[in-house]
Structure formats: structure tokens, C-alpha cells
Amino acid sequence: MASLKEELDRIATTEGVEMALVAGRDGFIIEYSGGEGSVAEGVGAIASSSLGASEVIGQELGRGALGAAMLEYERGTVMMNRVGVDAVLLVVLAPDATIGKVRYDVKKIIPELSAAL
């Protein structure tokens, strides 16, 4: 079985991906690939709280457990996926990334990330 770092490296080397990280629900970075460490640390904390807020929206609307969220910005897209119960995967995409391809690849790798935790 591949390590968490190896799995994140796989995601980070996908065309259009600038950074991939896994943060705990407490906001602390567990592992990351691509990007700068200082950026990853700050983003990890925010991603964790954003995922929590998104989960509450789903609960209030009766939509069940959150699987993923996608945020589109002027200069690229950010994807967040729940990894197990205690972690979140954050993938930062370049503006010209093929979102569907990355989303497909991320969905395939979530079980491996869960197992590596």
C-alpha cells in the first residue's frame, strides 16, 4: 500500500493541480504535496472549518453527509473532499485545469487516502 505522501504526490502531479493536502478536522496539516508549506498550513485550518460549515448546510437541508465541495475563484478552483471521518483533502487547481478529470481522479483515490491515514 502506498503512503499518504505517495498518494498526494500522485494527485499533485495530475495536470492542472497545483497543490494537494490532507488536514485533520482540527485544522492541522497531516501531509501535503506541491505548493509551499506556509500556504498549506494556513489553508488547512480554513479548509477544515469550511468543510464543517458545509456539512451543517447539508444537515439543515436534509441532504445527508457531505462528500465533496468545490469553490470556483477568478484564478482557479479549490476542491474539498471528506477523507474518512477525521480528515479533509484539499486540491488546488490552476485556472486552466480540466475539473472533471481531476474530480474523477480524486474520487478514485479517496479510498487509498483513507487507508493510508
Image (spheres, rainbow, N blue to C red):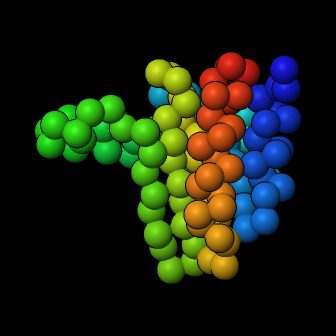
Residue 109, image x and y in percent? 68, 38
- Quarter of the image with the C terminus in it: top right
Q: Quadrant of residue 110?
A: top right
- Kindly identify the residue that appears in the image at 79 percent across and 58 percent down: 14
- Kindly identify the residue that appears in the image at 63 percent across and 77 percent down: 95
Q: How many marks?
A: 0
Left-right relation of 50 to 27: left
One can see residue 41 in this view: no
One can see residue 83 in this view: yes
Left-right relation of 66 to 62: right
Q: Quadrant of residue 83?
A: top right
Of residues 26 and 52, the one drawn nearer to the viewer in this rendering: 52
User: Height in image: 84 above or below 76?
Assistant: above
Q: Quadrant of residue 59?
A: top left
- Kindly identify the residue that appears in the image at 77 percent across and 29 percent down: 4
Of residues 44 and 22, the one drawn nearer to the viewer in this rendering: 22
- Kindly identify the residue that appears in the image at 51 percent across and 47 percent down: 80
Residue 17, image x and y in percent? 72, 61
- Quarter of the image with the N terminus in it: top right
User: Height in image: 84 above or below 34?
Assistant: above
Residue 64, image x and y in percent? 26, 33
Residue 115, image x and y in percent? 68, 19
Left-right relation of 74 to 102: left
User: Height in image: 84 above or below 62?
Assistant: above
